[in-house]
Image (spheres, grey):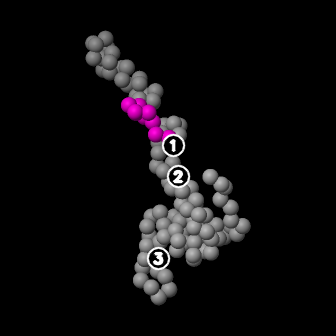
């Protein structure tokens, strides 16, 4: 993906703000019109930038949102889907230690 560039930093900040509103599906009040959902096309028209730039900003913002909602363990494995049958908790050393302790306790070797 090409880097996002806009020569005017204020316009870029306005675009990011509108994209954030677009992602949360906030309605806006246009002059003299009823409230309508915000679209990529309307953001581009309002700011005078291309729809592809707004689309790239939306993808970037969506990635940032998803990354902030992920656990540190999930971020460690990257954005690609995990292999079938591999759970994140299985990758955690804490989980493996707990499972080993449970297995030992089930065999009666230690009391928990």
Q: Give the range drawn in magenta.
A: 79-89
Could you tell me how far apart the alpha carbons at marks 2 and 3 are, in whole angstroms? 24 Å
Quarter of the picture holding the C terminus: top left
Could you tell me how far apart the alpha carbons at marks 3 and 1 are, in whole angstroms? 32 Å
The reply to whether dot 1 and dot 2 touch (C-beta < 8 Å) is yes
- Residue 78 colored magenta? no
Q: Where is residue 93 in the image (x, y as percent from the top left)?
A: 46, 27
- Circle 2 residues within 10 Å: few <14, some 14–19, many ≥20: few
Residue 86 picture quarter: top left
Residue closest to the far right: 7
Residue 62 seen = yes
Mark 2 or mark 3: whose residue is earlier in sequence? 3
Q: Mark 2 points at which residue?
A: 63
Q: Is mark 1 on a helix, strand or loop?
A: loop
Q: Name the residue under label 3.
A: 28
Residue at 57 percent across and 76 percent down: it is 45
**3 or 1: mark nearer the eye:** 1
- Circle 3 residues within 10 Å: few <14, some 14–19, many ≥20: some
Residue at 48 percent across and 37 percent down: it is 73
* Residue nearest the viewer, comparing 96 with 48: 48
Q: Position of residue 35 (x, y in %)?
A: 42, 79
Mark 3 or mark 1: whose residue is earlier in sequence? 3
Q: Is residue 112 left or right of residue 22?
A: left
Q: Is mark 3 on a helix, strand or loop?
A: strand
- Residue 88 colored magenta? yes
């Amino acid at each position: 993906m090409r880097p996002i560039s806009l020569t005017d930093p204020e316009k870029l900040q306005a675009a990011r703000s509108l994209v954030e509103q677009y992602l949360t599906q906030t309605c806006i009040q246009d002059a003299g019109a009823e409230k309508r959902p915000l679209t990529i096309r309307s953001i581009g028209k309002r700011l005078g930038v291309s729809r592809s730039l707004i689309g790239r900003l939306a993808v970037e913002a969506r990635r940032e949102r998803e990354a902030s909602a992920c656990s540190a363990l999930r971020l460690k494995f990257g954005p690609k889907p995990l292999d079938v049958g591999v759970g994140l908790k299985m990758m955690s050393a804490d989980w493996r230690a707990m499972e080993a302790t449970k297995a030992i306790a089930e065999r009666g070797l230690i009391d928990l």
